[in-house]
Amino acid sequence: MEAVIESGSSAASGSSTSSGSRPKPEAAFSDWANSWQPEDAPLLAARQRAAEVGVGAVDPPTGAALRFLVAAASGKAVIELGTGAGVSSLWLLRGMRPDGILTSVDSESEHQRLAKTSLTEAGVPAGRARLIAGRALNVLPRLSDAAYDLVFCDAARSENVDYLDAALRLLRPGGLLVYAGALAGGKIAEPSARDADTVALRELAKIVRDEPRLVTAALPVGQGLLVAALTP
């Protein structure tokens, strides 16, 4: 789609456009997507906290996609693996039902301290977010079977396949499993990209795609979301 648009624009002008004269279509779209649903002060403050401690945070288009997905799932009970400074937590909560509870797990207690500040500044009632400090694979076995509407994975990439196994138990029928950064910003499609993280993400995508209990999609937003719905 993008290549066709770019070619058509050049043909209409009758000449090739140099790369320095205007933004590439994908860059222009990225700028537009980031500004289309601008983040408010609490989200910007949470993002600043993440930057100060060097912890990753989903970009605004990815956050908007998370909000949409959890709203579409009528999310009341949601699990987040990787609290960070609370950026994705806020996006998820804004898509959840007013009586919904977010369970967010992170192995770094400092990250959760920052997230708690972010949630408080955003006016999130204390009872709507349950922050658990610990390794995800130690916490998940303690959570109830078939009780969750969405599981969002943005924690240790090396444990992604284990998160899949856990999510199949934790999700209700029709519930959603969402992996952040799952397309490595497009590198997953480049055969020459053979670094360990990209190879692991390719394998994860294959495993999720081939799981018969899941209906899957790869969404090219931000660094990429891998989304799967648990069939009834």
Image (cartoon, helix red, strand yellow):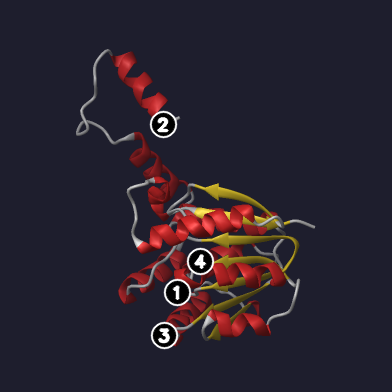
**Residue 158 point in image, percent of width and height:** 46, 71
Q: Which of the 4 image quadrants contains residue 226?
A: bottom right
Residue 2: give its label. Answer: 2
Q: CA distance from mark 4 to mark 1?
A: 8 Å
- Location of mark 3 (residue): 110
- Location of mark 4 (residue): 88
Label 3 Cα crowd, 10 Å radius (few <14 / some 14-19 / many 20+): some
Q: Please name the amino acid that badge 2 sits on.
A: Glu
At horizontal 40% and vertical 25% (from top left) the residue drawn is: 5
* Mark 4 in CB contact with mark 1 (< 8 angstroms): yes
Q: Please name the amino acid that badge 3 sits on.
A: Glu
- Location of mark 1 (residue): 84
**Residue 165 point in image, percent of width and height:** 63, 70
At horizontal 44% and vertical 52% (from top left) the residue drawn is: 222
Q: Nearer the viewer, mark 2 or mark 1?
A: 2
Q: CA distance from mark 1 to mark 3?
A: 9 Å
Q: CA distance from mark 2 to mark 4?
A: 29 Å
- The front one of 133 and 45 is 133
Q: Which of the 4 image quadrants contains residue 102?
A: bottom right
Quarter of the image where the C terminus is located:
bottom right
